[in-house]
Image: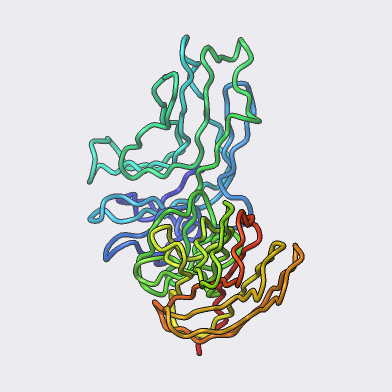
Amino acid sequence: MTVRAAWLLPTGQTREDTRLAPVGPMTPEGELRSRDGVIAGGDPLKAAGVASMQVQISTGRALVQGTDAQGAYPIAVTAPETLTLADGDAQHPRVDSVVLRVLDPLYDTSDQPVATLEIVQGAPSATPAPPRLPGACLRLWDITVPAGASAGVGGINWASALADRRRYTAAAGGIIPRGWGLSFPGAYPGQYRDNGTGLDRWDGNDWRSVAERHYVAVRKDESYSLAANRYTNVWWTGTDARTDASMWTPANPTRLVAPVSGLYTVYAQQTWPGGAEQARVLVVKNGVREWHVSFVARSNGGQGHAAALPVVLKAGDYIEVRLYTATAVDNVPGTYSYAALRWEGPA
């Protein structure tokens, strides 16, 4: 037997079964529920086409979750398993799924307890979708089966047909390895996961990078005009980079908002067209506190400055950039204005 399950058979579980299957407490998803998934290590449960309509699944370990009352089943695949797919539909393609499945007569209508690697066949369609899975089932791979595919007419193009759907789990308190999909909530504040480039921590509502960062860089796309002898807030039209959606919104297009308290650096860059005189750039906090960051007495065109200013902000405080010129200027390119706000750390 090459697909072994611990704590499934009413009798006959061997010491070898128990040693091979991951029987320790795993990452929780609730009071009685564990996060199912593949156990990392090498390239577990990898799929490879070995014939025109056959796929082989390599060795590996996993956890398959049933209902909350049923619990989770530790599984070990100790030798490669070869599965055969049904011929393709005459008219439409379909998507089949390779799954680890547990049958348990105490909780389903099966005749005997067994853990298997099997194919769950999808429905043929012009726009095929992966099949819905029965209970106590873990999806590993999706396979696109073309219309008319069979062993006699070319079969499946394995280079393009396989879609990796392995998600990973870890021991309780461990870091969840990166797998297919990151759109899942954490189970408890303080849980960690690998996001592919670093670590995230679940704060109870959202995943946040362990290397905490908060920044926004805003741009102005359209040209604008400035009246003489008047301070005018720059209306930004979009972001080039943003970690927190609240740091800039179209509803308040002049504001760069601090999502958390701390020390920030404000960056402001302005290029002045010809004709601007006594031109100034101000950084303004909450509409009141002002800092002059650059000055141009008279611009002959293309003159500008960039400045960085450290400021202490509380969560919800906002920064605006204001421009002043003693002479009116028209059709200033939007690319002449740029700004950014970056959190440096707690104050």
**In the shown orientation, is residue 110 left or right of residue 301?**
left
Of 12 and 175, nearer the camera is 175
Residue sticking out furthest to the bottom: 347
Report the residue at 23% width, 36% height from top: 109
Q: Can residue 138 be seen in this view?
A: yes
Give the vertical position of 280 relative to 217 (above or below): below
In the image, residue 271 lies at what x, y percent?
69, 65
**In the shown orientation, is residue 147 left or right of residue 281?**
left
Give the vertical position of 252 relative to 125 (above or below): below
Of 5 and 256, nearer the camera is 256
Report the residue at 46% width, 15% height from top: 92
Colour scheme shown: rainbow
**In the shown orientation, is residue 125 left or right of residue 336?**
left
In the image, residue 262 lies at what x, y percent?
49, 85
Give the vertical position of 63 relative to 211 (above or below): above
Of 78 and 338, nearer the camera is 338
Give the vertical position of 174 relative to 62 (above or below): below
**In the shown orientation, is residue 75 left or right of residue 328?**
left
Identify the image quadrant of residue 196: bottom right
Identify the image quadrant of residue 186: bottom left
Report the residue at 43% width, 55% height from top: 14
In the image, residue 236 lies at what x, y percent?
52, 60
In the image, residue 148 lies at what x, y percent?
53, 12
Q: Can residue 26 be seen in this view?
A: no
